[in-house]
Amino acid sequence: MTGSTEHSTTPAACCDAGTDPAPAAPRLWTVDEHLADVLAAVGPLPAIELQLLDAQGCRLDEDVVADGDLPPFDNSSMDGYAVRTADTEGATDAYPSVLPVVGDIAAGAGELPKVGPGQAARIMTGAPLPPGATAVAPVEWTDGGTGTGVAAAAMTAPVPDEEVRVLRPVAEGAHIRRRGSDVAAGTKVLDAGTRLGPTQLGLLAAIGRATVKVRPRPRVVVLSTGSELVQPGEPVGPGQIADSNSFTLTAAAQEAGAIAYRVGAVPDDADRLRAVLEDQLGRADLIVTSGGVSVGAYDVVKEVFESYGGVDFRKLRMQPGKPQGFGRIGGEAGVPLLALPGNPVSAYISFELFVRPVIRTMLGAPDVHRPVVRALCPVALRSPAGRRQFLRGRHSAADGTVEPVGGAGSHLVGALARADCLITVPEDVTELPAGSEVDVVLLDS
């Protein structure tokens, strides 16, 4: 699941004169290597059957075929009168067709009057078309049963009317919703892989489906680590800061399609962190942490995660976000873990590059990665050698340009909030002149 840790070859000269060889430098992973390693260890979650509203945001794991017709019967699309077309031929205001009203049909009616030659039945929108009728005359085309010969605006006459005056001809089939005109029985209405939103759920309900087989939304537990963190709204003492990472990452997980649980900040205490993890494992398909993955003396995250086994901490050729942790808690069948750096910008960019693709993969989504476009940068860029740099930027689709927002610091949350993309500078590039074309990862997509 995780790659091996490689070491560089120690020059032979280091061993001359009895000296000890210098310690080998740890391997630096590329962004692509780390991402491939992470994605190789996860896949779509097993499909389950869910009630319709519980399935919102999930993707279908089956083709859905309608068992019956929609609408299930011929019905009226207007308030008016069910008539025979032949009985309205030549009708005008001066010479209306005067038809006895044989009944009143409301939506949901079961017993329907038969409309014979020279007859009409008052009918409401959505009500079933009675036998014998071939069209519906809208109430505006009649006197509404008032006997005045004046077109009516509403169905206000007694129930049933004695007779109605139809003031214009009604074409065959007018104002009738035919059975199966929306969906015919046996028609495939939704493909496997379709994301279920409000309209798709409404269609499923309309064809009579109460449950549906889907790939569930992954449950993502998000927690921040660090004794310096306090909850927003609480007093901030000396050396303390408000915990923003858990809010950023929880919201990002939800936006990616997950069901996200924000645990909040956990102090730098191994026993406390272990207790929180044990408490959360039962409801997690994925655990995401921020902080404690560097080489600080009080970084207990490594200590705790390594005690579970199967978690690898590594350094990447990227800026920001060099230190990363990845593995499973509880062996090969355990819960996947992505441990991100603690600086806010590093944590968010790491989420976009690595965690979001994991969530999208678990969902079974076809669009695992953010879209990448090429754009012209009107300002010069500098980047450290050997690192793929991700600068925050604002992209203009109108003119195909992108400009950096703020500096490169991994603590600049103000600039991050104004950005809608990431400007990528490759590992082997240290300078780009103004007007260069760059890769841009679109975040607002």
Image (cartoon, rainbow, N blue to C red):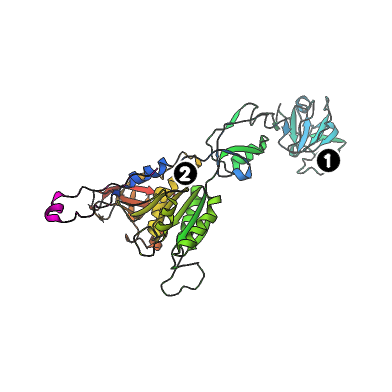
Q: Is residue 7 magenta?
A: yes
Q: Residues within 10 Å of mark 2 (few under 14, many from 20)?
A: many
User: For the residue marked with disc 2, what is the amino acid?
Assistant: Arg
The residue carrying mark 1 is 148
Disc 1 secondary structure class: loop
What's the CA distance linking mark 1 and mark 2? 66 Å
Choose the circle earlier in sequence order: 1 or 2: 1
Quick check: 169 above or below 337? Answer: above
Element under label 2? helix
Residue shown at the point (74%, 38%) measured from the top left: 125
Kind of residue at badge 1: Thr
Residue depicted at 23% across the width and 48% down the height: 8
Instruction: State the residue at coordinates (35%, 63%).
Output: 296
The spot of residue 14 in percent (x, y) is: 15, 53
Q: Which residue is mark 2?
A: 360
Q: State whether residue 418 appears in this view.
A: no
Residue drawn at point x = 15 percent, y = 49 percent: 12
Say left or right for 365 vs 374. Answer: right
